[in-house]
Every structure is written in structure tokens, then in C-alpha cells.
Image (spheres, helix red, strand yellow):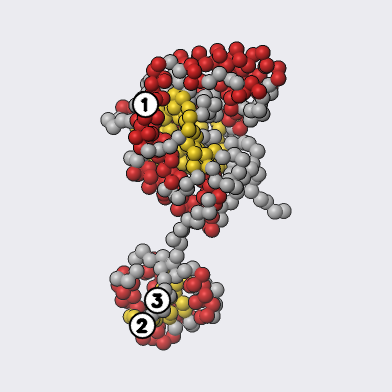
Amino acid sequence: MNISVPRGTEDLLPENTKQWQVVEEALKGLAHTYHYDEIRTPMFERTELFQRGVGDTTDIVQKEMYTFEDRGGRSLTLRPEGTASVARSYVQHKMHGNADQPTKLYYLGPMFRYERPQQGRTRQFTQFGIEAIGSADPAIDAEVIAFAMDCYQVLGLKSLKLVLNSLGDKESREAHRQALVEHFKPYQEELCSDCQMRLEQNPLRLLDCKVDRDHPTMSSAPSILEYLNDYSSQYFEEVKKHLDAMGISYVVDETLVRGLDYYTHTAFEIMSEAEGFGSITTLSGGGRYNGLIQDLGGPENSGIGFALSIERLLMALKAEGIDLETGQTLDCFVITMGDEAKYTASSLVYKLRKAGFRTDQDYLDKKMKAQFKAADRYKAKYAIIIGEDEVNNGVANVKNLVEGEQKTIELDKIIEQLETSV
């Protein structure tokens, strides 16, 4: 019986993980530049965290979570997103009491959602995200958006579109909520069953429905921007001014609502406009959350963040024809002839690795010609050849595979010579 991976998951083989490592290091480097520190939270949390933090009316909570009971009867859920976990940790560990504020964190790890698998969307996927908690300054919103754009631009992507909206504060959202109910109520029976429920619980979510998105009432629905109070409107203008000052282009889309209930004020998405990328163009998204920390038992501190899918980022790179330079080469490949040479090679390979050289050797008793071919496949910089004569004389032939030059060097001086050459 052959056992394959579960549907919606995939193996990342070495030829793939090399690209992942390049992307991950680039993202971590950006986090360092922007002064964000790494946080690692558990892959499963109490189910209540996501019910309260993400929202009972979201598709994530209602349809997509992997939830189970442990042996103690506690309901646990594999994390479907990162913000709720970071917010929980922020509250639990009283990070709001730290001297340096806002608290700026990044995370990188697997998330889990039960949805229909398709290209770039799997049931286990990897998110990179950031959270800046403890400031209500529009400038930090612009910083987070700039960070998100840089995540793609630093890897060479150009066909990008930044879309902005404001969801307003609590007062603005309530006014908009009433307008949406009045707008959709006469057509409630024409909507899908989910939207009929959302109309009563959270009508803003109707604007994000994939089933009813072509219904005539969607295009004529009242805009949130028409219901922003003075504070919310001014806040949005300030965010845009900061982006203008940075020279970051954007488009305001009044229908952008995002899929999570905790968003307030700034919401944004980054999309790929590359030809052949696919019908689902969103690469990443984020926004401000002014009530989440308080809902989880913390102070009235607001935050803003975003998350991106590594899988979709790699899709965008492929769509734009960008090949990542993985830099995966060997410093040295040791070629041996004869049994005694193998013992000498084992000692030398060990010493080379201890000195920091990426080194390998043949373990299949290949002929010398085949060993040289292996060195070429590994893109080794140097081939170190050891035979019976070399063992007897305490030397090795070191060949520069890039320049073709070959030297005979005493075994105990090879590392010293390489350190001045590599």
C-alpha cells in the first residue's frame, strides 16, 4: 500500500526548499531592517481564541478551521492565521509594559485551513507576517504597508498593485452597517444562505462573498467611505499622505473589506498584475485592529499588521519569470582512489567541515571520471584528489574547477591554503 500526502498538502523537495530559503532569508532581512523581532507561537491554540479574535461570522471560523478535542476534552484548533496568536501572546506576556513601544513582531510558519485546494492555496500553507502593536499613529500604518510592498520588490517583483480602503472606527462601522441592512434587506431571499445569515450578524461580510459577488445589489451597495466620521476620514487621509511622501502608489477600493472581523480603519491588499498569474490575484493583505487586544483581555492598545503566503509569492516570481539565485554550491569535493585514500579523505572532509567549508565526497565507489562529474553537478569550486601516492607522501592534488589550475599541497596545509583562496 502506497501512502501519499494528505490532500491539500505537499512535500517540498530539496530543489524547492532552496528557493524557499532564499525567500525566507530575504523576508527576515527586511524584518531586521524595519526593526521587527521574531515571535514563535504554538501551531495550535484554544479554539476560543479564533472564535473571539477572528470572528464567529467569518468563513475561517465557520468552515475552514481544523478543530479537535484533546484527551482532556479541551477544544483546540490548528492556527488558521497568525494575528490572533500574536495578540494572545502580547496580552499574556504583558508586552504592553515593555519600555520600547510600539511592540514590533514578525512570524513565519505553517497555518492550516480546510478549503478547496488549488494552485497557490493549500490546506497547510506558510505565512510570513508582522504586527505592530501599541500605536495609533497613521505613520505606522504606512510603515506596515511599505514593509509589505518591500517583501515583493526586494525579490524583484514589479507587476504589483496596492489597494487601500478604510473600514472606519466603531461609530462609522455601525452607521455603515445600518445602511447595508437597509440596502440588502429587500433582496435577502435572493442571496445565498451564508449571506442571508451575514445580513443579520455582520452585513459588511456580504461585500466579500464569492457566491453573490455578481448580484446587482453588490455594485450599488453603500460605500463605507460615505459613512466615515471626521476622525476616521482624517485618519485615512493621514495614512495616504504618508504613502504619498514615500512615493508608494496605491488605488482606493471602497469595496475592500478583508476576511477577518477584527479590522478597523486601514485595510489593504497587494495584488499581482502579472500575465498568467491566475484569476485570484491577491498576494497578501492586512489592516488595523483597534479592539482585538482589548477583546483578548488586554489594554486598549491598537495594532496593525499584514500576512503573506510564501506559496503565492513564489507563484508571482514564476509568473514574472524571476529565477532566484540559490547560491547552493560546494566549496570542495574530495575524490579518492583506493581504500587507504578513503580513510585519509574521511579525516580531511571532517576537518574541512569543521573549518566551515561546504564539503562532500563519493560514497558509491565510483570511478575517478564519475567522481569528477559529481563534482561538476554539485558546482564544486575545488576538487581534492587523493590516491595511494598522495597518501604515502602526505599530500593531495587540489584543482580549481573554475579556473582549471591544479596544485599539489601538503594535507595539513590544505585548509590554510583554501582559507586564503575561497
Q: Quadrant of residue 328?
A: bottom left
The answer for how far apart the CA atoms under marks 3 and 2 are is 16 Å
Give coordinates of residue 410: x percent, y percent: 33, 80
- Which of these two is toward me, 54 or 211? 211
The answer for how far apart the CA atoms under marks 2 and 1 are is 68 Å
Q: Nearer the viewer, mark 3 or mark 2?
A: 3
Give coordinates of residue 103: x percent, y percent: 35, 32
User: What amino acid does circle 1 point to?
Assistant: Glu
Q: Residue at x 39, y 25 (%)?
A: 237
The residue indicated by pointer 3 is: 403
In the visual, does 178 lie left or right of 391? right
Which tag, 3 or 2, sits closer to the chain's start? 3
Q: Quadrant of residue 409?
A: bottom left
User: What amino acid does circle 2 point to?
Assistant: Thr
Q: Residue furthest right?
A: 1
Which tag, 1 or 3, sits closer to the chain's start? 1
How many C-alpha atoms fall within 10 Å of the one at disc 3: few (<14), some, or many (≥20)? few
